[in-house]
Every structure is written in structure tokens, then in C-alpha cells.
């Protein structure tokens, strides 16, 4: 399951967004022990909906994203860097920074004014500061270990961490570093916060909803979102709350009136999914239709392991058909007759939208 940590300053709408994304009925906890509140969101995918309509299975299982929120604590100013060391954030695959752009005199900003570019830079500095502390502590230990006995691996780790320290001291996040695959692998265990892909969730004022396409420029963040593994998605949490309280038919009509093709929540979930470079393949049948999440570039045998390790170990062949071909023909048998259902080996690279049946030894 993909994991994303929600961060943001007080009164940004972060906790409300967490509740909306995860359908949490109660406000997340705050204070006390440093524990994150965790909830799960389904990844919207109309392809799975259409496959379910085609096969009418007993179960319909979408891909999911797990969101973690620190209630009122994370990103609260002094001490935020320490709070961001909570395991749920360190273990997250990506961070979502909820940025306040809405204007509401009854909900004052802690800094005294609404300035999304300032808030984004301040939070980025918090992430950098937290990582710099980790790097410096590890380099100190490495110095001691190298005096006891130098090894090529320790020397290489020291070299990479020094490069990281230089970037952090210059105020640059580690996600901006273009590291070789092996060097990135060496750093993976540190779970650096500023190395994680970052999605800016721009929480708009209701009056600015019509200019959502210009949200990044209105926030003064054009340069920031050009960074590596950094994206932005605009929403209006106030509108999303209203939509969430409507039945599906009324919600669809309301969104149509606003000129919205999909809810902001769906955009956030989809953007989180895409930011990490994940794709979906599908398994179908009378019992269950399911979407499975895998990194782009995954081969068929590794994809089989997402279903069960026994299927991966006993992998023989993958029966693959494109989603669009299956929908057009209506049955797997018709796809087979037209040569659109093919057999692939273990090194076949799974594509987004593949419908797969794995043949395997028991």
C-alpha cells in the first residue's frame, strides 16, 4: 500500500482534508504521545468500475493510499522538525503539504497573513533542518567507525552523506539531488524527509475556485514546483466538505454547476498515486475484480508477487489483455479469438491498464 504523510501549518485545512480523504468521522487526536492518525483512501479509477459492470463480481477492490496526519501538531512552528520524525512520516512514500490560500478573518493565520509561498518555504526549511540533524549525527558516528577500521562501504557512505550535508546546508532538499541508483539505495534506510516526493495541496478560497488552473502562479510557486519530484494540485476544502455531505446524484449535479469534472479529493488521491510513479493493473473474474498498485517498469513476475509470493515463485506465464480491448470485445474469449489476449514471460514489463491472469505452478 502506498503511504503519504499530510503536513501543514495550523489553520491550513490539513486535518479537515485528512478527515475528508479517509472518511474519518471524528477529528484526529492531537497532543500527548507523538502518534500519527492513519486512514485509507480508495484510488478512483473508472476503468475498474467498468470492468466490474462487465463481470459483476462478488467483490470490487480498488487500489488504496494510506494517509497519516499528526492532528494539530506537525508543522506547528517551533519543534515541528522533531514532530516530523514520527515513524509514520519517516516511513511515508511521499509528503503532502496542505497550503493555505483561503481568506477567512474568523480563522487567523499564525503568521498574521496569508502567504502561501512563505509557508511552503518555511515548511521546506523544516524538512531540511530535520534531515540535516540526521546527516550530522550519522557522519559523527562514521568518523568514529572509520578510526576503528575503514572499509570501502563506510567511505562511500561518508562521501554520499557529505554531499547531502552540503545540499542541506545550502537550503536544497535532497529530492533535488540526481543520485546514481546505488547511492540512492544506500540512503534509503535513512528515510530522509526532504528526499520524499512532495505534493503541494493548494487550499483555495471559494471565490478563487474559477481560477484553480492558475493556483500555482497565484501562490507564487512556479519556480518551486519545477523542482524534482514536486507537484501541486488545487482544491477548495470548504467546497469538498459540502460535496461530501451530498448524495452521489446531488454531488454530481453540484460539481457540474461549478464546472468540476471530478472532486478535489479524487484529484489529490490520484496526484499522490501518480507522483510516486505508480500504475495499476487489474485482475478480473466472477469472485473479484481488483486494481493492483506497482511501480512503473515492474516486470510480470514481480507484479505477480503483489498478489501472492507463491504466484511469483511458481510463475509460468501471464495472460495479458489491454483494458480497452476487453471493454470493446466484452469477453476474454472474444479477445482471444481476435488475437488480443497474449501470453507473456516473466520479464514482460507490465503497462498501466493491463488485465492479467497469472498462470503458476502450485
Image (spheres, rainbow, N blue to C red):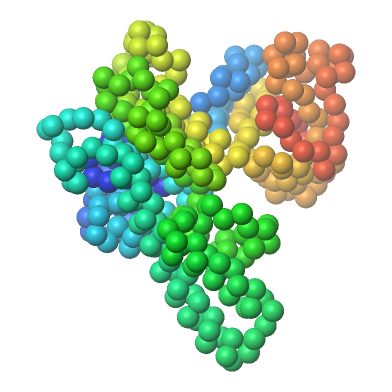
On-image quarter of the N terminus: top right
Residue found 27% across the figure and 46% down from its top: 9
- Residue 66 visible in the displayed image: no
- Please state if 79 lies on the left or on the right of 65 as rendered: left
- Please state if 224 lies on the left or on the right of 314 as rendered: left
**Who is closer to the viewer here, 120 or 320?**
120
Q: Quadrant of residue 128?
A: bottom left
Up-down relation of residue 57 to residue 174 (above or below):
above
Residue 212 place in picture, x, y as percent:
38, 23
- Please state if 339 lies on the left or on the right of 274 as rendered: right
Up-down relation of residue 205 to residue 137 (above or below):
above
- Residue 323 visible in the displayed image: yes
Residue 322 place in picture, x, y as percent:
74, 23
- Residue farthest along the left direction in this orientation: 106
**Who is closer to the viewer here, 226 or 297?**
226
On-image quarter of the C terminus: top right
**Image label count:** 0
Up-down relation of residue 346 to residue 176 (above or below):
above
Up-down relation of residue 140 to residue 325 (above or below):
below
Residue found 23% across the figure and 45% down from its top: 10
**Who is closer to the viewer here, 163 or 335?**
163
- Please state if 62 lies on the left or on the right of 267 as rendered: right
Residue found 80% across the figure and 35% down from its top: 318
Residue 222 place in picture, x, y as percent:
44, 36
Residue 257 place in picture, x, y as percent:
35, 8
Residue found 40% across the figure and 11% down from its top: 259
- Residue farthest along the bottom direction in this orientation: 148
Amino acid at each position: 500500500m502506498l503511504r503519504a504523510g499530510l503536513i501543514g501549518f495550523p489553520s491550513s485545512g490539513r486535518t479537515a482534508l485528512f478527515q475528508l480523504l479517509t472518511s474519518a468521522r471524528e477529528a484526529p487526536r492531537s497532543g500527548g504521545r507523538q502518534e500519527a492518525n492513519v486512514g485509507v483512501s480508495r484510488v478512483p479509477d473508472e476503468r475498474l468500475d467498468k470492468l466490474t459492470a462487465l463481470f459483476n463480481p462478488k467483490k470490487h477492490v480498488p487500489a488504496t493510499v494510506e494517509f497519516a496526519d499528526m492532528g494539530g501538531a506537525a508543522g506547528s512552528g517551533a519543534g515541528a522538525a522533531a514532530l516530523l520524525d514520527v515513524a509514520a512520516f519517516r516511513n511515508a512514500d511521499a509528503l503532502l503539504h496542505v497550503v493555505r490560500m483561503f481568506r477567512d478573518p474568523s480563522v487567523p493565520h499564525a503568521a498574521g497573513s496569508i502567504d502561501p509561498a512563505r509557508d511552503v518555504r518555511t515548511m521546506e526549511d523544516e524538512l531540511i533542518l530535520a534531515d540535516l540533524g540526521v546527516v550530522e549525527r550519522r557522519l559523527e558516528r562514521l568518523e568514529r567507525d572509520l578510526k576503528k577500521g575503514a572499509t570501502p562501504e563506510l567511505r562511500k557512505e561518508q562521501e554520499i552523506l557529505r554531499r547531502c550535508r552540503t545540499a542541506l546546508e545550502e537550503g536544497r532538499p535532497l529530492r533535488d539531488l540526481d543520485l546514481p541508483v546505488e547511492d540512492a539505495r544506500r540512503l534509503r534506510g535513512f528515510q530522509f524527509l526532504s528526499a520524499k516526493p512532495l505534493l503541494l495541496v493548494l487550499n483555495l478560497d471559494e471565490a478563487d475556485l474559477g481560477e484553480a488552473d492558475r493556483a500555482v502562479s497565484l501562490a507564487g510557486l512556479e519556480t518551486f514546483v519545477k523542482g524534482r519530484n514536486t507537484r501541486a494540485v488545487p482544491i477548495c476544502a470548504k467546497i469538498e466538505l459540502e460535496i461530501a455531505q451530498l448524495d452521489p446524484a446531488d454531488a454530481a449535479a453540484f460539481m457540474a454547476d461549478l464546472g468540476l469534472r471530478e472532486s478535489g479529493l479524487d484529484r489529490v488521491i490520484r496526484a499522490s498515486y501518480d507522483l510516486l510513479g505508480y500504475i495499476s493493473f487489474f485482475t478480473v473474474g466472477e469472485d473479484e475484480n481488483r486494481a493492483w498498485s506497482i511501480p512503473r517498469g515492474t516486470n510480470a513476475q514481480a507484479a505477480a508477487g503483489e498478489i501472492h509470493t507463491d504466484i511469483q515463485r511458481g510463475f509460468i506465464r501471464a495472460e495479458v489483455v489491454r483494458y480497452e480491448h476487453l471493454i470493446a470485445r466484452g469477453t476474454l474469449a472474444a479477445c482471444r479469438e481476435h488475437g488480443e489476449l497474449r501470453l507473456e514471460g516473466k520479464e514482460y514489463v507490465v503497462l498501466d491498464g493491463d488485465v492479467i491472469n497469472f498462470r503458476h505452478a502450485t
